[in-house]
């Protein structure tokens, strides 16, 4: 059943004031929380600044109970059959316990307080129940419980993932202390209501939340203390690790035979970390059996990681973990594992013979999957696909193929139950049931690979491939795997994040590969927006995955200016970049040396912190381009520039910038070599490479014959407009249009 978030409804309920009751005060060294006897939050004061953190004129009950329909005998005779919220209407404190009563129910919630210097913890200890003297009464169910909800006045920043409202003076954070705590927030113009709740299907007792009210600078230390006290993954320590900002080279097709070639390219690109993708050494996801390229198994994988470490780099592991491949023994071992997740269940209405291609079933076929590869049934010990289904009685699955994935066709009696397996949308994998022990099994295998090979950081790929509730299972599955990784990863990234995952996915996420011709608009639309959002949560984003693609066919390939743009924005946000390293493309691209030099230079500048915060703010502008050079003494030189040649042309690519009084054009050939015939007025042009070294060229009077190959800087004593006109006149003679990739 879908969750109903209590807060939205609770805000509309009138509160029942309790005559004569005393306010409840909860405070530590940093904050003073006042709750009225009527159950509404009245004040939240940050002590060191004296600031009131609650929104003015907002009276929200701190707790609420949600029933998916009224369960009390008299209540369900009064109210319709739909979810109903019962707000707190009275509260009192006895020692380190709060006793909370609710409108129109007979529940008394007992909430345990854990008051520490840096935070105040809340957890539901038990629910008592009063039986009324009249009517038909029994203890009623609780489907959801709002443990704490606070309407905060808006501030400059709201971190949705971490669940924090903050500015330069004060930060207010309501943090889950367990994967089973549902954390949410409801921002409006008047207030941002932070919510911590519990779900009966996940667990009402055990999960909790911690309230932190601090200075901006004090927030992460307070969260770090919570992580230690509650034995959570150390997300704060990870964000402070010296390797946190390091970009990584993501290996493709790596073997013991070619690892050294990869390492050489990574070294030239300034990479200090390298990621091994499990598909290079494992046949399938689930059991992770060894590919033939790794005949020595772990010994071969250890050789790869040993070579990475010997080069002074940190090895990482990229894996899928919440699903199993259809080519894995869990599926194709002859006896399909019953712990796969299913999206629905059908019942055979008639017996099915061994060779039958039509199955007559009972159940709703309206929602059955129709996509190719996702129509996979588990019936008994057999896997069956269907081509189509009827949507009116008699319900039938037609065009059935029997005994798939090494299972054996069999006869099945009427009444047998067939489960439609939760095949992912690639479709190459089946998602696993998170309520079974299979996730722990898979985590154990990954933990052994991680430890024995000496990996130190990870990417949780396919994090979206879990069943509902997503807010719980995304982090739950990651937590199971994370706990199996020893030593704990220095940092981690993942494909999907939920609140508890803030402690695990300390570097956020990467994006899938964008084509070269669309790299800027795609990064503006996705990566840069994500960087700004993640910064609200005190987290970086991976400015990747960036493909390494050589020019050819309908693409100009990845060019140096594209890497300048990506690395510039990553530096501005103090974030890593990930490069997908394919040896064939690296060897084939004529501008590989230029590309790698761009990467290395920006990476070195980022890790050396050569730019001020004010400079970084300017670099964040998504519509501004910058190039980074070095002078002969190794000092960095940053120049704003603008593009002269369009993206849909192959040949010479050019950008213009000013150096003192000179107009400078940085240009190169995208796919090979050529010559530019440039007629100039009387002037003394100079031509250098991007490291300031002179490049010789021929002159025949006013005609300059310029080499067009690797990156070169043409310096002209001309106004920008004239320099642009003359240069583009020469370029148009050799450039050709291309049809961009879709």
Image (tube, rainbow, N blue to C red):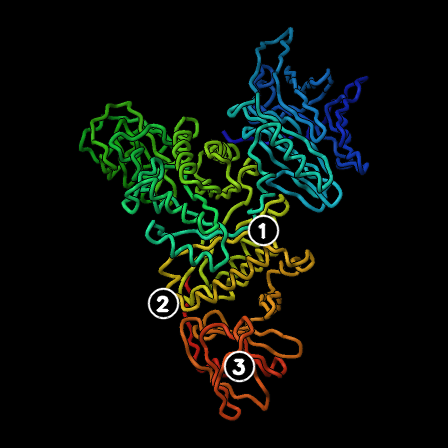
Q: Is residue 110 left or right of residue 693?
A: right
**Which residue lies at the image location 60% right of the left edge and 63% below the top edge?**
623
Q: Is residue 266 left or right of residue 537?
A: left
Residue named by callout 1: 531
Q: Is residue 306 above or below residue 683?
A: above
The quadrant holding residue 323 is top left
Pointer 3 or 1: first along the chain:
1
Which secondary structure, mark 3? helix
* Residue density around tag 3, few if under 14, some if 14–19, many if 20 or more, within 10 Å: some
Q: Is residue 143 above or below residue 638?
A: above
**Which residue lies at the image location 72% right of the left edge and 27% below the top edge?**
14
Q: Disc 3 and disc 1: Cα gap in Å?
A: 37 Å
Residue 732 in percent (x, y) is at 47, 80
* Residue density around tag 1, few if under 14, some if 14–19, many if 20 or more, within 10 Å: many
* Residue density around tag 2, few if under 14, some if 14–19, many if 20 or more, within 10 Å: few
Residue named by callout 2: 553
Q: Is residue 37 visible?
A: yes
Residue named by callout 3: 727
Do tag 3 and tag 1 residues touch (Cβ < 8 Å)? no
Which secondary structure, mark 2? loop
């Amino acid at each position: 059943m879908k969750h109903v978030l209590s807060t939205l409804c609770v805000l509309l309920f009138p509160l029942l004031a309790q005559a004569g009751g005393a306010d409840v005060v909860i405070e530590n060294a940093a904050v003073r929380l006042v709750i009225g006897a009527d159950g509404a939050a009245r004040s939240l004061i940050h002590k060191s600044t004296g600031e009131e953190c609650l929104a003015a004129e907002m009276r929200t009950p701190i707790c609420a109970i949600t029933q998916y329909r009224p369960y009390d005998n008299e209540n369900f005779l009064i109210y319709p059959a739909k979810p109903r919220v019962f707000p707190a209407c009275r509260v009192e404190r006895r020692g380190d316990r709060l006793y909370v009563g609710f409108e129109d129910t007979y529940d008394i919630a007992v909430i345990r307080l854990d008051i520490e210097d840096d935070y105040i913890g809340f957890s539901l200890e038990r629910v008592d129940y009063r039986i009324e003297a009249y009517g038909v009464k029994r203890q009623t169910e609780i489907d959801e419980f709002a443990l704490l909800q606070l309407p905060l006045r808006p501030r400059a920043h709201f971190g949705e993932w971490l669940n924090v409202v903050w500015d330069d003076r004060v930060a207010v954070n309501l943090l889950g202390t367990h994967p089973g705590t549902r954390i949410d927030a409801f921002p409006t113009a008047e207030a941002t209501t932070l919510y911590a709740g519990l779900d009966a299907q996940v667990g009402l007792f055990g999960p909790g939340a911690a309230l932190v009210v601090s200075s901006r600078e004090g927030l992460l230390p307070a969260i770090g203390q919570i992580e230690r006290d509650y034995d959570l993954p150390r997300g704060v320590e990870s964000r402070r690790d010296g390797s946190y900002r390091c970009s990584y080279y993501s290996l493709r097709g790596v073997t013991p035979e070619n690892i050294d070639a990869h390492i050489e390219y990574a070294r030239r690109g300034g990479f200090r970390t390298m990621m091994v993708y499990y598909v290079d050494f494992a046949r399938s996801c689930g059991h992770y059996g060894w590919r033939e390229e790794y005949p020595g198994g772990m010994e071969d994988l250890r050789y790869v990681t040993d070579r990475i470490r010997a080069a002074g780099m940190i090895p990482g592991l990229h894996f899928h973990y919440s699903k199993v491949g259809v080519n894995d023994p869990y599926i194709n071992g002859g006896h399909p594992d019953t712990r796969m997740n299913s999206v629905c269940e059908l019942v055979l209405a008639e017996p099915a013979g061994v060779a039958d291609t039509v199955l007559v079933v009972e159940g709703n076929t309206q929602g059955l999957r129709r996509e190719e590869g996702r129509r996979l049934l588990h019936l008994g010990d057999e896997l069956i696909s269907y081509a189509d289904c009827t949507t009116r009685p008699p319900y039938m699955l037609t065009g059935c193929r029997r005994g798939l994935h090494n299972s054996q066709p069999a006869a099945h009696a009427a009444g047998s139950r067939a489960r439609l397996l939760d095949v992912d949308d690639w479709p190459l994998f089946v998602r696993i049931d998170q309520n079974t022990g299979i996730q722990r099994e898979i985590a154990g295998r990954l933990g052994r690979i991680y430890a024995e090979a000496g990996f130190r950081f990870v990417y949780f790929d396919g994090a979206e491939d879990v069943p509902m509730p997503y807010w719980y299972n995304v982090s739950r599955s990651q937590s199971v795997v994370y706990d199996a990784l020893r030593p704990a990863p220095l940092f981690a990234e993942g494909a999907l994040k939920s609140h508890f995952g803030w402690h695990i996915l300390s570097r956020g996420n990467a994006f899938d590969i964008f084509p070269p011709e669309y790299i800027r608009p795609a990064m503006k639309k996705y990566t840069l927006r994500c960087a700004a959002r993640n910064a609200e949560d005190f987290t970086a984003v991976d400015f990747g995955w960036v493909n390494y693609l050589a020019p050819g066919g309908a693409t100009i390939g990845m060019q140096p200016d594209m890497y300048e743009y990506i690395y510039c924005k990553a530096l501005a946000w103090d974030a890593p970049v990930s490069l997908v390293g394919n040896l064939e493309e690296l060897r084939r691209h004529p501008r590989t040396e230029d590309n790698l030099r761009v990467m290395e230079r920006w990476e070195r500048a980022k890790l050396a912190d050569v730019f001020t915060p004010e400079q970084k703010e300017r670099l964040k502008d998504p519509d501004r381009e910058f190039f980074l050079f070095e002078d002969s003494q190794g000092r960095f030189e940053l120049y704003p520039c603008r593009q002269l040649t369009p993206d849909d042309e192959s040949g010479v690519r050019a950008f213009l910038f000013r150096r003192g009084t000179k107009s400078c054009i940085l240009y190169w050939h995208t796919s090979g070599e050529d010559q530019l015939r440039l007629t100039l007025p009387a002037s003394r042009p100079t031509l250098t490479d991007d490291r300031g070294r002179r490049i010789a060229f021929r002159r025949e009077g006013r005609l300059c014959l310029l080499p067009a190959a690797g990156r070169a800087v043409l310096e002209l004593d001309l106004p920008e407009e004239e320099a642009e006109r003359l240069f583009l006149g020469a370029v148009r003679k050799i450039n050709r249009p291309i049809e961009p990739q879709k």
